[in-house]
Image (cartoon, grey):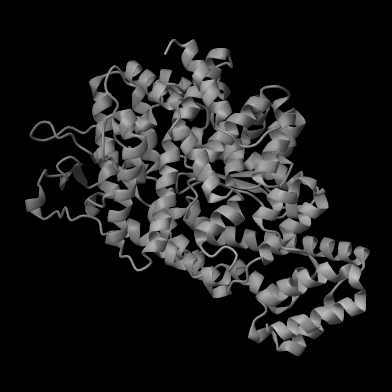
Amino acid sequence: MKDDAVRQTVERLVEKHGPQHAERIRLGVGQVAERWWDEDGDGEVFSAFCERSFLADPAELARTFERLERVLEQVDGHLYEVRRELTTPIDVDTGEISIADQYLANLDLASHVNEDLFRTKVAFLALLNFPVHSLCQRLAEGAGWDRETWARSRMMDRFALRVPAALHQEITEALIRAERYSSSYNIRLDRVVSPDGPDGERLFQEGRRLISHWGLRDELASHYADPSPAGLVRQRTILRIMERIVRQEIPAVVIDNPDVLWEPFSNTVRRVQDGAGVEAGISNQREPDTRYACLLGVFHAVRKVDPFSPGEPTFVDRRFNLERQIPEAEAEALLVSVLESPEVRDLARAIRARLGRPLEPFDIWYSGFKARGAHNEEELDRLVRSKYPTVEAFGTELPQVLQRVGFSPERSRWLAERIAVDPARGAGHAMGAVRREDRAHLRTRVPRGGMDYKGYNVALHELGHNVEQVFSLNGIDLWSLSGVPNNACTEAVAFVFQNRDLELLGLQTPSAETRRAQALATLWNTYEIGGVALVDMRVWRWMYDHPDATPAELREATLGIARAVWNRWYAPVFGVRDSDILAIYSHMIVYALYLPDYPIGHIIAFQVARRLEEGDFGAELERVTRQGRLTPDGWMRGAVGGPISARALLDAAGEALAATGR
């Protein structure tokens, strides 16, 4: 919109409503003008809209906010439920995915909503009368805002960007392609053979079919409970498999294929039935660079939003400032404070002493400080299967699980009534509701024969998400404040649940010793995923610097970045250089710069968990999660009385190491 039209509109509105409204008028008219396109009308249409739609009466302003909030909850909620139905065959194990399922999963009716709100002038009505706040404003002023001011500010987040609906649809399709690739990327460990001997020996039990990276990582970690040399061989083998995946050296034919045997060190393939090798016609041609093509597809889709986001001109800016609500530099400094801490080096020395050998790259997933490290994986699997032979069995026992966590019987029933449990096709995830009349969904993978320990551990993580989702929606005072400030906050709650897995199975009781073990395990987990997050962040920066890169070029850049991060913060601790294992996480491909939420979540979770130990767990968790979408800093100050900081975790780990004599 031309400056003259904007100036004249402001002057007329000030004259009509009085100078006491001048500041609001200038802000509102400017917000509308920034998002007004030629197709919305000329200068006269613009001015007429503003003159007709500016609300000077505070009572009318309040009624308008209430009406918008009520309608948006219903619109967003119903469309979210439709989207969940469209993607159910992709996300939930309902049988074979049909061609119709594949096409329907690309349909996102919600991608048009915001544009329709602009076309109908609803968005412009909101922009004219309610301010859009930047992260800087919220950090500077938010502590003095009341709940309604916060709710109005959060409502306006959806109108901060005006993005064509076609771009939303394109982003959805790119993410679906990446999700489809990752959720079907299973490795048949039961078909992996040892390099020793002429025929090779199968290293893993029959039926071991695991998704990358989640299942492979958890399988590797489980073998710390196996003191025999065979456990170490299996860990080294899984590491080599992961390296083949990130380098795209893995033979395409071995992916989720029960009909071939694979020796990952020599990277050779042969048939299961006859023992014939490559010469018999089995190709060991590597997988194309599909992994990196999927990531580039997501990058190119989200990058098209950049011209429509002048305040946050890159996806990285939007991810940190608009979604995460933590400046990128601040987030990176928080991660580095852990990576460079002396407590990490002390902990690594303790792990070396426990293992009785030098550290190897896969030891970033060392699980010996976790209480489950003392339990055999097969024993845990048997126990969990006996309790939860089906997904339905886990869902039925949700009220009892929630009571054991620390909620009252009444609150446990209330929560369980608002959570549905589904069999996940992938590793598992949680889907919160949007309308208060809907239910949250917990998706967890349950193999044939019953839930195993890994599935149970993931299910508790997702249950933590669901509990947060229910409290921060159904227990919130204003719908626009529903949710938590960012994904790290919900990950924090999920980690609190996940870390109590053995306690809920009756295999552990809280004590000073278990708290010390938890501090050490959390620090090591944060150290591991902190480097993964930095790789994710730097890969996105590289893509912005090289927007025309090919999948092969992105592959080499990603490997180089992973090695650089490893060499700076891990090689001095491990004594091994140039590992690219930090690039294995499938989140990097599927969830578009999500990974920093995990280490930040670990740090927040530790602070929150310590606070929850001080009183009634259920009541305190409900209080914390019902704060709503403040800034993360404000949310944490309300939760624990201080800002986000790794200091509590580092101090607790240091004390634990001192107590154990390390």
The quarter in which the N terminus is drawn is bottom right
Q: Residue at x 61, y 41 (%)?
A: 489
Residue 473 as seen in the image, left or right of residue 466: right
Relative side of 613 to 238, left or right: right
Asked if residue 519 shows in the view, the reply is: yes
55 w.r.t. 240: above or below:
below
Residue 300 versus residue 560 in the image, above or below: below
Identify the residue at image location x=39%, y=45%.
585
| Residue shown at the point (42%, 17%) measured from the top left | 374
Q: Nearer the viewer, residue 124 or 63?
A: 124
Image position, residue 620 (x, y; %): 73, 30
Q: Report the label total.
A: 0
Is residue 256 visible to us here?
Answer: no
**Whole-percent x and y of residue 197?**
10, 31
What residue do we see at 59% from left, 48% from top?
Answer: 326
Q: Viewer-proximal residue, 134 or 619? A: 134
Q: Is residue 622 left or right of residue 652?
A: right
Quadrant containing the C terminus in the rendered view: top left
Whole-percent x, y for residue 156 in the image: 72, 62
Can you give x and y, in whole percent of width and height, for residue 462 in the image? Answer: 56, 40
Residue 638 vertical position relative to residue 327 in the rendered view, above or below:
above
